[in-house]
Every structure is written in structure tokens, then in C-alpha cells.
Image (cartoon, helix red, strand yellow):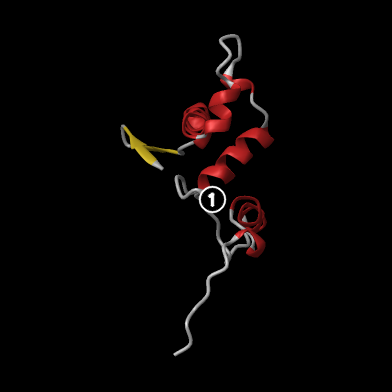
Amino acid sequence: MSCTKGRWNRWSPLEYLDTIHLQVISMDDQLIEKISDDSFDPLTLTHEELMGGVRRLTLACLATPIMCGSSLQNTAVQPLMDAIVTYLPGPAERPIQMYASM
């Protein structure tokens, strides 16, 4: 929330949605190649393409998706779990590390 002239206004993430999309596009090589055509509008990318870009950036440790919720009120718990499954690597995608026994 922000205070403007004594009144509290709710901050809307939709105000910054285009900026977030352009940041994801500018950091992901596959999306940059896709929009390299002069006639392509970057704001017409599909939701799946943007999610794939966020996943690639997350796996490369170049970006971190941030989610908010409240387990006390059971608010946004399911979207958080969906984001964990969507953006973070699964056990089969992680490199195998061998540890020496002590």
C-alpha cells in the first residue's frame, strides 16, 4: 500500500505487468530470438512462452520468482505450490552429487 495525500491506495501489480514481461524477454535468449523479427510484437507472447522463460531464468539462477500468500488464512497457497512445481527443478533435473564418506 502507498499513501498519497493522506489516503491509502492499493498497489496493483498489473501496472507493472508490461515491464515484467519485457524484463523476462530481455533476459531469456530463446525469447529474444523469437522477437528478433521486426514485425513481431513482444506483448503478443503466450502465457506458456513467458512461463518457460521464467523457468529457464530460474534454473540458470538469473531470476527468482516471488509469490505472496498466507497459510494462516489459506490465501494463495495453491498458486504457490503450482509455482514451485512449474518454476523450480525437479529431483531428476538436478545434477547428481557424490559425497565422500567420513
The percent coordinates of residue 76 (x first, y second) are: 62, 54
Q: How many marks?
A: 1
Residue 1 occupies quadrant: top left
Q: Label 1 crowding class (10 Å Cα cut-off): few <14, some 14-19, many 20+?
A: some
Q: Give the image location of residue 91, x and y in percent.
A: 64, 65
Residue 39 placed where, x, y %? 60, 9
Lateral position of residue 101 relative to residue 6, left or right: right
Residue shown at the point (52%, 53%) measured from the top left? 68
Q: Is residue 37 above or below residue 7?
A: above
Query: Circle 1 — which element?
Result: helix
Q: Position of residue 26 (x, y in %)?
A: 47, 29
Which residue bears the numbered disc 1?
Answer: 59
Q: Nearer the viewer, residue 82 or 33?
A: 33
- Disc 1 marks a residue whose amino acid type is Leu
Q: Nearer the viewer, residue 43 or 16?
A: 43
Q: Quadrant of the C terminus?
A: bottom left
| Residue 75 in sight from this viewpoint | no
Which one is in front, 74 or 51?
51
- Residue 43: tell me if it is visible: yes
Q: Is residue 98 left or right of residue 85?
A: left
Tell me the residue at 49%/78% (across/down): 99
- The structure residue drawn at horizontal position 64% and vertical position 21%, both measured from the top left corner, is 44
In this picture, residue 19 sits left or right of residue 80: left
